[in-house]
Image (tube, rainbow, N blue to C red):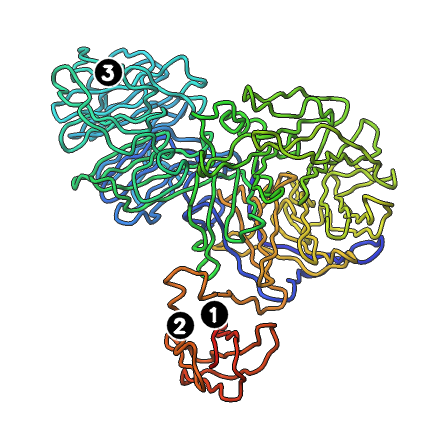
């Protein structure tokens, strides 16, 4: 997924009927636009090689000179970064290793002046502190270095390529000694000078060089001359090692207990003497719910500072979902930094506009916050590999090879479902919730595979296996779940005549899974066109399609079509010409940057996401152009391949009229969020009766009930106004709120609603006049 950033963008007009688009300067839609993001603690684009963000794939962490160093991978650029230990703030990026798919770093160690990264196949790269794109020097070039540790001016190295452990003099970087160790990975040294090495387990699904899903088996010990000592073999799937201030060996990994085990008596026969973290980790208590305790998962890195604080690197996903968390010795969270994934989409719960779900994670939004990136908070991890091992999200190949991402969030008869699909729109996976038994975990429910043979498209809840046999005579591309549970999919046969498949919802089985056991298929009018994406507006029964002519190359998405009365008597209502590979509109056109990739309908509008990251807005009734939102967020203004999935955009219209646009941002490792208010007056409505105490106490209205006057206390800003409405909504009185006193002597006895308005918020409360 190549991401290269350029700035220029231009707008083309699409009008009612079939017309050529006219190039013009980019024009934003009328109203206000707030640009932000969800799912990464940081998001700042510095230049073509430097990005301030948490990398998405986490392999190792080490402390040094007030910084925490992060070794991992990021799809755009390298995976080396550093963060301040006091608060987790970003302090530097290391390496620019290629652009495009980036290059991973596997291990890290630091001195007071320099940081060293072990890489798979590029040896050890030395950098100066503070962030640097170019290494000062490379050692053991060509080797896969899976473990690094520095102590007393010695560097301890796990050379996986040559099956060796080396000890180097850190001043001269010359070898003191080396010896043979089969499959060495993580390495640490205790206070007595004994060297501990984690040995890779060949039963892992990957080698350490191939990817992150490997794990170890035995933990071996050696003297500083290479003489073997005691070993540890009772820890399931170890992945990380560290020594604490009590000279105990800390071990973490990928297992159901999800704890760090502490081993003592390191000079003799090591034994388990304690643990850190809650038993069963993130799935303890309310399963999948994050809080301020050490609920850990897939522990990939550990380190301890002089004060006894423990830094833990965890993964919350198939292998993405990187988090570094700092805890005090008691296990209370001090700070957390997080990255969800570079390949993901988010959807909002139709019944709760503050709740966002992605393929692995649940976030809550506070729309009253205005600093970009501050609205979201991490609430839940929705994949439980231990309880549901056949969940397709557990398989890392569905991210690496199939490249799946969050498709959307739906409710069927009030029940919440999240969905996932791949970049091309194939295979719709549905997940249900059982809050009582599974908390935040999304349970595998239904899969609709490629093709429309419904006999192969159901999840068997009895055996908990996915019955998937791919039908090759047709393929589906993009899909949508209606409010009544019906599923619509776009299908293309080998000939260019498009079809739309409908799977009617037939109720729920005894497990709560939707039942789909029949299907119908209908041709899309006008065989001159080939379709590559759909959006169904069930309120108007209009089907919207991304289209090209059958004489065009497949994927040349030049049009958006509106088919009215889809379920009764379908006919084309309008077709809009949209910019395609127009360098005035999207100057980067490689990797789909210059074409419409995904569409969604919400409220009165159709939203079309370009591969470059532009969001083109059309009037859904006429196809006329409303405007284009181009990006400008902390230096990031889009890039080719930012959106490259048929389900790469979701849009939600809030109760205050604001549209929340969530779409893929592969370049920054987050989900981009635009908040567009067409009227320019979408205030945050704060209802005193249903908000938490902090918001409820923003203002205080007294007395209530009252007779002739209302008194308002609180932070009354200049320009604050008020409105008093009848309970039916009729405006009765309004004015400026300067002194905090409102006369209501002209109102009759009864129940009323008062609205206190500022530029950003609207506070609402009922009152009674006696």
Estimate how packed mark 1 is, as few (under 14), some (14 to 19) or many (20 or more) residues with alpha carbons within 10 Å: many
Mark 2 and mark 3 lie on one chain; the one further toward the N terminus is 3
Q: Furthest-bottom residue in view?
A: 746
In the image, what residue occupies the spot 38% across and 37% down?
80
Kindly indicate whether the residue at mark 2 contacts the one at mark 1 (C-beta within 8 angstroms).
Answer: yes
Instruction: Indicate which disc residue 232 carries.
Output: 3
Left or right of 242 in this view: 680: right
Quadrant of res 119: top left
Q: How far is mark 3 from mark 1, CA to CA? A: 61 Å
Residue 431 place in picture, x, y as percent: 56, 34
Looking at the image, tell me whether mark 1 or mark 2 is earlier in sequence order.
2
Marks 2 and 3 sit apart, C-alpha to C-alpha, by: 61 Å
Q: Residue at x 76, y 26 (%)?
A: 474
First-in-chain label (3 vs 1)? 3
List x then y, in percent, for residue 511: 56, 29
* In this picture, residue 467 sits left or right of residue 336: right
Tag 3: Cα neighbours inside 10 Å, few (<14), some, or many (≥20)?
Answer: some
Among the 4 quarters of the image, the one containing residue 645: top right
Q: Secondary structure at mark 2?
A: strand
Q: Is residue 196 above or below residue 731?
A: above
Where, quadrant-wise, is the N terminus in this rendering? top right
At horizontal 34% and vertical 32% (from top left) the residue drawn is 281
- According to the picture, the residue beneath numbered tag 2 turns out to be 699
Image side of residue 31 versus residue 606, left or right: left
Q: Which type of secondary structure does the marked residue at label 1 adopt? A: strand
Q: Which mark is residue 763?
A: 1
Of the numbered discs in the image, which one, if any, rests on residue 369?
Answer: none
Q: Is residue 46 visible?
A: no
Image position of 245 (left or right of 398): left
Query: Do the numbered discs 2 and 3 sit on residues whose CB atoms are within 8 Å?
Result: no
| Label 2: few (<14), some (14–19) or many (≥20) C-alpha neighbours in 10 Å | some
Q: Label 1, label 2: how many angstroms apart (C-alpha)?
A: 8 Å
């Amino acid at each position: 997924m190549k991401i290269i950033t350029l700035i220029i963008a231009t707008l083309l007009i699409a009008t009612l009927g079939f017309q050529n688009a006219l190039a013009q300067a980019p024009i934003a839609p009328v109203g206000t636009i707030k640009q932000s993001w969800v799912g990464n603690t940081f998001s700042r684009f510095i230049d073509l090689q430097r990005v301030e963000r948490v990398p998405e794939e986490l392999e190792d962490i080490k402390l040094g000179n007030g910084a925490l160093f992060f070794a991992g991978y990021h799809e755009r650029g390298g995976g080396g970064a550093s963060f301040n230990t006091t608060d987790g703030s970003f302090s530097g990026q290391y390496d620019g290793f290629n652009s495009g798919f980036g290059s991973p770093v596997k291990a890290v160690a630091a001195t007071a002046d320099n940081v060293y990264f072990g890489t798979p196949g590029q040896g050890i790269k030395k950098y100066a502190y503070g962030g640097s794109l170019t290494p000062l020097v490379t050692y053991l070039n060509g080797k896969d270095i899976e473990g690094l540790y520095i102590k007393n001016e010695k560097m301890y190295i796990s050379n996986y390529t040559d099956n060796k452990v080396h000890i180097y003099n850190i001043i001269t970087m010359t070898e003191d000694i080396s010896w043979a160790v089969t499959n060495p990975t993580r390495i640490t040294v205790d206070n007595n000078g004994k060297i501990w090495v984690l040995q890779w387990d060949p039963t892992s699904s990957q080698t350490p060089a191939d990817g992150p899903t490997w794990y170890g088996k035995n933990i071996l010990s050696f003297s500083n001359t290479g003489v073997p000592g005691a070993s540890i073999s009772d820890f399931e799937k170890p992945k990380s090692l560290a020594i604490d201030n009590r000279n105990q060996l800390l071990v973490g990994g990928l297992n159901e207990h999800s704890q760090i085990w502490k081993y003592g008596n390191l000079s003799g026969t090591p034994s388990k003497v304690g643990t850190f973290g809650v038993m069963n980790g993130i799935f303890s208590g309310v399963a999948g719910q994050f809080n301020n305790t050490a609920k850990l998962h897939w522990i990939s890195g550990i380190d301890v500072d002089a004060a006894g604080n423990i830094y833990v690197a965890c993964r919350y996903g198939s292998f993405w979902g990187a988090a570094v968390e700092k805890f005090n010795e008691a296990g209370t969270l001090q700070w957390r930094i997080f990255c969800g994934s570079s390949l993901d989409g988010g959807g909002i719960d139709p019944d709760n506009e503050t709740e966002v779900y992605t393929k692995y994670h649940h976030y809550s939004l506070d729309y009253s916050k205005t600093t970009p990136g501050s609205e979201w908070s991490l609430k839940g991890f929705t994949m439980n590999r231990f309880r549901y091992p056949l969940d397709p999200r557990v398989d890392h190949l569905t991210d690496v090879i199939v490249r799946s991402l969050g498709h959307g969030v739906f409710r069927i008869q009030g029940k919440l479902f999240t969905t996932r699909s791949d970049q091309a729109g194939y295979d719709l996976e549905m997940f249900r919730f059982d809050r009582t038994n599974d908390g935040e975990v999304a349970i595998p429910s239904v899969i609709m595979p490629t093709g429309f043979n419904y006999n192969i498209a159901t999840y068997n809840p009895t055996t908990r296996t996915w019955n998937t046999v791919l039908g090759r005579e047709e393929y589906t591309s993009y899909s949508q779940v209606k409010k009544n549970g019906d599923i619509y999919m776009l299908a293309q046969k080998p000939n260019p005549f498009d079809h739309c498949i409908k799977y009617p919802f037939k109720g729920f089985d005894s497990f709560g899974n939707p039942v789909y056991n029949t299907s119908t298929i209908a041709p899309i009018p006008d065989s001159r066109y080939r379709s590559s994406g759909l959006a169904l507006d069930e309120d108007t029964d209009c089907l919207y399609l991304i289209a090209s002519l059958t004489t065009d190359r497949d994927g040349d998405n030049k049009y958006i079509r509106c088919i009215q009365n889809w379920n009764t008597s379908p006919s084309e209502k309008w077709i809009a010409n949209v910019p395609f590979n127009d360098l005035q509109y999207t100057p980067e056109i490689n990797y789909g940057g210059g074409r419409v990739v995904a569409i969604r309908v919400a409220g009165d509008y159709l939203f079309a996401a370009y591969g470059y990251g532009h969001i083109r807005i059309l009037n859904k009734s006429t196809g006329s152009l409303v405007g284009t939102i181009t990006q400008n967020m902390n230096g990031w203004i889009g890039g080719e391949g930012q959106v490259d999935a048929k389900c790469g955009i979701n849009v939600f219209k809030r109760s205050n009229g604001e549209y929340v646009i969530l779409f893929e941002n592969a370049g920054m490792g987050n989900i981009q969020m635009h908040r567009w208010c067409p009227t320019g007056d979408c205030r945050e409505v704060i209802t005193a009766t249903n908000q938490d105490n902090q918001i409820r106490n923003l203002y205080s209205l007294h007395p209530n009930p009252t007779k002739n006057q209302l008194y308002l206390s609180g932070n009354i800003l200049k320009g604050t106004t008020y409105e008093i409405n009848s309970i039916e909504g009729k405006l009765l009185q309004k004015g400026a709120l300067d002194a905090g006193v409102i006369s209501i002597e002209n109102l009759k006895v009864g129940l009323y609603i008062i609205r206190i308005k500022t530029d950003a918020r609207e506070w609402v409360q009922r009152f009674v006049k006696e």
